[in-house]
Amino acid sequence: MKEPFEILKMRNRIVRGVAGSFILISLILAIYVNINWLWFTAFVGANLLQSSLTKWCLLEDILKKFGVSDSDKSCC
C-alpha cells in the first residue's frame, strides 16, 4: 500500500506538469529569444504561490469542466 503523500491525484499531477513545463519553456525562450519571457516565469510562480495560499487554481477548474477525474485510477 502506498503512503498518502505518494499518491497524487490526476488533476494535481496535470497542474504540476503544466506549471513545470511553462517555467522550463519560458526560461528557454528567455535565453534564446528575449529576456522579457522571464515575466511569464514570474507570473507562473506567482500563481503557484497564490494557489498554495488560497487553495484555488484556475487550471483545476478548467480541468474539472473538461471532465478530468480527481482519482489516480487508470481508465482501463
Image (cartoon, grey):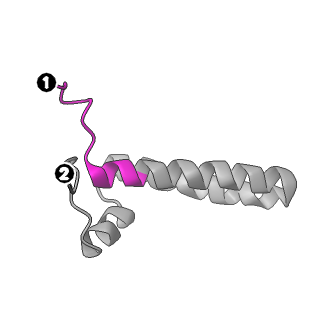
* Residue at the spot 38% in from the left edge and 64% down from the top edge: 59
Asked if residue 10 lies in the magenta stretch, the reply is: yes
Task: Look at the numbered discs 2 and 1 and tell me whether their residues touch, using CB distance below 8 Å.
Answer: no
**Left or right of residue 54, residue 50 in this image:** right
Q: What amino acid type should be assigned to the residue bearing mark 2?
A: Ser
Residue at the location (57% across, 52% down)?
Answer: 21
The residue carrying pointer 2 sits among few (fewer than 14), some (14 to 19) or many (20 or more) residues within 10 Å by Cα, namely: few
Q: Secondary structure at mark 1?
A: loop
Instruction: Check disc 1 and report the residue beneath it.
Output: 1
Lower sequence index among marks 2 and 1: 1
In the rendered image, residue 47, in percent from the top left (x then y), is placed at 47, 56
Where's residue 12, x and y in %?
A: 32, 50
Picture quarter with the C terminus: bottom left
- Compared across the picture, whether 19 is left or right of 2 comes to right
- How many angstroms separate mark 2 from mark 1 (CA)? 16 Å
Task: Examine the residues drawn in magenta and state their main secondary structure.
Answer: loop
Count of picture labels: 2
**Residue farthest to the left, as pictured:** 1
Residue 37 locus on image (x, y percent): 74, 59
Residue type at numbered disc 1: Met
Q: Nearer the viewer, residue 31 or 69?
A: 69
Residue at (36% x, 48% y) in the render: 13
Q: Which residues are magenta?
A: 1-15
Q: Say which quarter of the image contains residue 30.
A: bottom right
- Position of residue 3 measured from the top left corner of the image (x, y, whole percent): 19, 24
In the displayed structure image, the side of residue 67 where residue 14 appears, left or right = right
User: In the drawing, what numbered circle is on residue 75?
Assistant: none
Q: Nearer the viewer, residue 43 or 75?
A: 75
Image: 63 above or below 46: below
> Which quadrant would the N terminus be assigned to in this image?
top left
Residue 71 image label: 2
How packed is label 1: few (under 14 Cα within 10 Å), some, or many (20 or more)? few
